Image: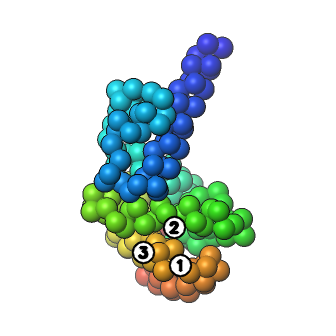
Amino acid sequence: MMVGLRERKRAETRQRISDRATRLFEQRGFESVTLADVAAAADVSVKTVVNYFGAKEDLFFDAEPAVLDGLVATVANRENATATAAIRPLVVNGPILAGPCSWRAVDETMWAAMRAFARCERDSPTLTARRASILQSWLTPLAEASGSAAWAAAATGVLILRHSIVQDGLLAGRSPLSVRRRLNSTVGVALDALERGFSDGQA
């Protein structure tokens, strides 16, 4: 009972730190926000922030480990489907990669928050570099899940394309419908090519 309560409080603290950091990044930009700022906003110590997240970049990309876990689990548990067919819904069916939100659930408030987040990332050389590093780090787990390093490399390229289309659309002020259509057409074609390229059962 006590363990459950302790874990719940830890999860609540972690989420509070993440939420406060996100708001600060959106308001002031990533580079100008310090760990001390985040700690003060979350009403915790800097040591607590570091214990939970390690570095400021980890705060910004807090959701990425769960995204990777979702992709890897989907590929590993695909049964008779190809790896490409398995990940297609995660790639195109919502505004956030492997996220629970569908395109139909997007409202103006959410889209504005996503735009602020995209602007924050695009404006920061630190975050741009970390994004590239994160995507590079996905190659090995995707290769292990699919059984094909070649497929993992090609699939990562599709994910990079997806990120670019969504980010560019947000920053250009395009509507969710417009971004969704471009995603379905451009990334859909890339996924089709990936499916054809690995149609011999390699992944």
Sequence-wise, the earlier of marks 1 and 2 is 2
Circle 2 SS class: helix
Task: Please rate how many residues cluster around mark 2, counting C-alpha atoms within 10 Å: few if below 14, some from 14 to 19, many from 20.
Answer: many
Sequence-wise, the earlier of marks 3 and 2 is 2
Q: Which amino acid does label 3 sit on?
A: Ser
Is 58 or 186 nearer to us in this picture?
Answer: 58
Residue 94 lies, in percent from the top left, at: 62, 67
- The quadrant where residue 184 appears: bottom right
Which residue position holds label 1?
Answer: 173
Q: What residue type is labelled 2?
A: Arg
Residue 53 lies, in percent from the top left, at: 39, 37
Is 18 or 92 nearer to us in this picture?
Answer: 18
Q: What residue type is labelled 1?
A: Gly
Sequence-wise, the earlier of marks 3 and 1 is 3
Q: Tell me which residue sits at (60%, 83%) in the image.
A: 178
Residue 21 at least partly seen: yes
Which residue position holds label 3?
Answer: 164
Circle 3 SS class: helix
Which residue position holds label 2?
Answer: 115
